[in-house]
Amino acid sequence: MANHITAADAPRFGQDGFDMTGLAAPSRGCSTLSTWRIRAQPGAASPVHRLTSDEAFVVVRGELTATLDGQDVVVRAGDSLSVPPGVDFRIANRSAEPFEAIASMAAGGQATVGDGAPFTPPWAA
C-alpha cells in the first residue's frame, strides 16, 4: 500500500541555517529510500561531513556551493549533484537568494561529522 505524507504533516527540522522537510523515509513507510526537501537561507553553511551512501541533490531554486574534498562546485536551479560515500563535503549558500533542493540517499545511510560517531540524520530516518 502506498504511503501519502501531506505537506502539512511532513516533519520539519532546522540545523545550521538549513530547514529540512522529511519526505520519504523508513519512519514514513519507505523502506529503501530517504528523501527530503532542503532549504538554505543566504549565509547558511553545513559542517564538513561524509556519508555512508550516495547523496543526490536536485536543485529547484537558487544556487549552492558544495565543497568536495577541498574543491568548490556551484550548483544552480535545474542542476543535480551526486556526492559519493566517504567524501568529505560541505554545502553553503553563498548567494543573496534562498536555495531549495530535493535530496535523497539510501535508507539507513549515515553521516559523520569530524571524528564523531556515525548517525542517521533525523530527516532521513
Image (cartoon, rainbow, N blue to C red):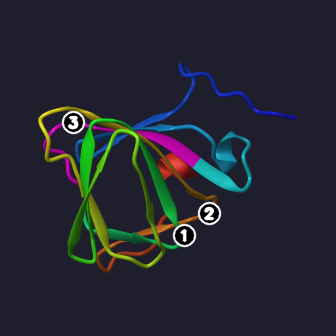
Residue closer to the observer: 122 or 50: 50
Q: Which residue is mark 3?
A: 41
Determine the secondary structure under disc 3: loop
Pair 2/1: label in front: 1
Question: Marks 1 and 2: in contact by CB < 8 Å?
Answer: yes
Residue type at mark 1: give it.
Ser
Viewed as shown, does residue 117 lie left or right of 52? Answer: left
Amino acid type, mark 3: Gln
Answer whether residue 37 is magenta in the image.
yes
Would you call the spot at circle 1 few (<14 residues within 10 Å), some (14-19), or many (20 or more)?
Answer: some
State the residue at coordinates (22%, 72%).
71
Residue at 76% in and 33% down: 3
Q: Earlier in the sequence, mark 3 or mark 1?
A: 3
- Looking at the rendering, which quadrant does residue 39 occupy? top left
Image-based side of 10 in relation to 12, left or right: right
Which residue is drawn at the image coordinates 14% and 47% (left, top)?
Answer: 94
The span shown in magenta is 35-45
Q: How crowded is the residue under tag 3: few (<14 C-alpha within 10 Å), some, or many (20+)?
A: many
- CB contact under 8 Å: marks 3 and 1: no
Mark 2 surroundings within 10 Å by alpha-carbon count, few (fewer than 14), some (14 through 19), many (20 or more): some
How far across and how far down the image is residue 4, in percent?
71, 27
Q: Which residue is mark 1?
A: 53
Q: Quadrant of residue 17?
A: top left
Disc 2 target residue = 108
Residue 16 in the image: state x and y as whole percent: 24, 48
Q: Secondary structure at mark 1?
A: loop
Marks 2 and 1 sit apart, C-alpha to C-alpha, by 9 Å
